[in-house]
Image (tube, helix red, strand yellow):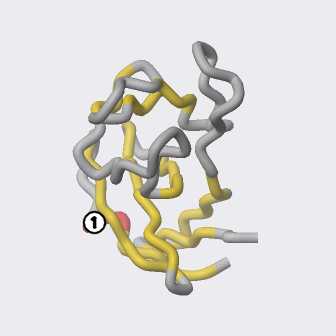
């Protein structure tokens, strides 16, 4: 696992784009649970930094594709899956496993 950011840098219901090993990762904090996803929609590569997060899903700002934050699946378009990464909190550090 690699350090991606500090918990204090990703406010509750907030997002932060970080670079981990040369990859752009979007961190999302929902009530203390931090998710890490690829910062690129698998549909057409749109950045997800401006995406809307609601009810455990992230919606691409370009075409509205909705991806589950836990597993990256898109119920409406199952052929598209957003890459998600395991997260571990260690004190104020957010650790991400890029596999």
Closest to the observer, 90 or 4:
4
Locate residue 89 relative to residue 65 in the image: left or right.
Answer: right
Q: Residue 64: where, in percent of width, then height?
A: 36, 24
Placement of the C terminus among the 4 image quadrants: bottom right
Closest to the observer, 34 or 22:
22
Q: In this view, does 1 lie above or below 14?
A: below
Q: Residue 82: where, in percent of width, then height?
A: 59, 43
Q: Residue 69: where, in percent of width, then height?
A: 54, 36
Closest to the observer, 80 or 51:
80
Locate residue 24 relative to residue 96 in the image: left or right.
Answer: left
Q: Is residue 85 above or below residue 24?
A: above
The residue positioned 29% from the left and 34% from the top of the image is: 62
Dot 1 falls on a residue whose secondary structure is helix
Q: In this view, does 4 lie above or below 81?
A: below
Looking at the image, the residue that sits furthest to the bottom is: 21
Where does label 1 land, which residue?
A: 8
Closest to the observer, 39 or 42:
42
Placement of the N terminus among the 4 image quadrants: bottom right
Looking at the image, the residue that sits furthest to the front is: 44
């Amino acid at each position: 696992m690699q350090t991606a950011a500090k918990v204090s840098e990703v406010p509750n219901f907030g997002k932060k784009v970080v670079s981990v090993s040369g990859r752009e990762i979007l961190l999302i904090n929902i009530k203390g649970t931090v998710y890490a996803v690829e910062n690129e929609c698998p549909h057409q590569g749109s950045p997800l930094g401006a995406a809307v997060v609601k009810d455990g899903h992230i919606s691409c700002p370009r075409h509205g594709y909705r991806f589950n934050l836990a597993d990256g699946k898109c119920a409406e378009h199952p052929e598209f899956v957003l890459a998600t990464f395991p997260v571990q909190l260690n004190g104020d550090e957010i650790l991400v496993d890029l596999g």
